[in-house]
């Protein structure tokens, strides 16, 4: 069910709002950054995402994948979302919202949602990694 969620970084300087259907599924990636950050995300299109506050508090980190913009708060270091530009496997720009940064998430709904695992470590985004227990 589509619901509007609010969320933030740890210190609250960065605030977001997004229209999300958690039951449609979430994602976890095994790339070096997502593994170290333990990112558990949900994908939304740009029209479903709103940066409410904190644009000036954001730092954009780009690793080896030039289309991935990993935004984090330069005050507390938390990454509430990232933007994935094209070209990517979906063919459109989207945002990955860090579910741990959302307010009021129903834990039962979250754990019941399907999880798709991405093999970002091997740049094979359409495949599931052979090991996912640590993600």
Image (spheres, grey):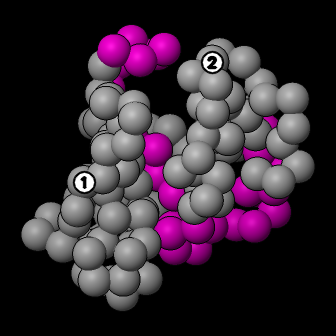
Q: Which residue is drawn at 81% across and 63% down?
A: 108
Q: How far apart are marks 2 and 1 (CA)?
A: 23 Å
What segment carries the magenta color? Answer: 87-114
Relative to 130, say whether 48 is above or below. below
Name which quarter of the figure residue 1 lies in.
top right
The residue closer to the viewer here, 5 or 90, is 90
- Camera sees residue 105: yes
Q: Residues within 10 Å of mark 1 (few under 14, many from 20)?
A: some
Relative to 15, say whether 22 is above or below. above
Residue 60 horizontal/vertical position (percent)? 24, 54
Q: In this view, does 87 lie to the left or right of 55?
A: right
Residue 52 horizontal/vertical position (percent)? 21, 65
Q: Judging from the image, what secondary structure is the residue with disc 2 in?
A: loop
Residue 12 horizontal/vertical position (percent)? 33, 83
Q: Is residue 58 left or right of residue 34?
A: left
Q: Which residue is drawn at 64% across and 25% down?
A: 122
User: On residue 124, which mark appears?
Assistant: 2
Residue 92 covered by magenta stretch: yes
Is there a contact, CB below 8 Å, between mark 2 and mark 1? no
Name which quarter of the figure residue 45 lies in.
top left
Q: Judging from the image, what secondary structure is the residue with disc 1 in?
A: strand
Which residue is most to the bottom?
11
Name which quarter of the figure residue 58 lies in.
bottom left
Q: How crowded is mark 2: few (under 14 residues within 10 Å), some or many (20 or more)?
A: few
Mark earlier in primary sequence (2, 1)? 1
Residue that numbered label 1 is attached to: 60
């Amino acid at each position: 069910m589509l619901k509007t969620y609010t969320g933030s970084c740890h210190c609250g300087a960065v605030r977001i709002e997004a229209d999300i259907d958690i039951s449609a599924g979430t994602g976890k990636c095994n790339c070096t950054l997502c593994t170290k950050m333990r990112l558990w995300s949900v994908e939304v299109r740009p029209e479903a995402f709103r940066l409410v506050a904190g644009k000036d508090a954001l730092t954009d980190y780009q690793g080896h994948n030039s289309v991935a913009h990993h935004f984090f708060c330069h005050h507390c270091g938390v990454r509430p979302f990232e933007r994935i530009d094209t070209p990517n496997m979906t063919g459109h720009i989207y945002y990955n919202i860090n579910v741990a940064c959302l307010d009021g998430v129903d834990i039962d709904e979250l754990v019941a949602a399907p999880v798709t695992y991405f093999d970002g470590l091997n740049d094979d985004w359409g495949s599931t990694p052979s090991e996912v227990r640590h993600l």
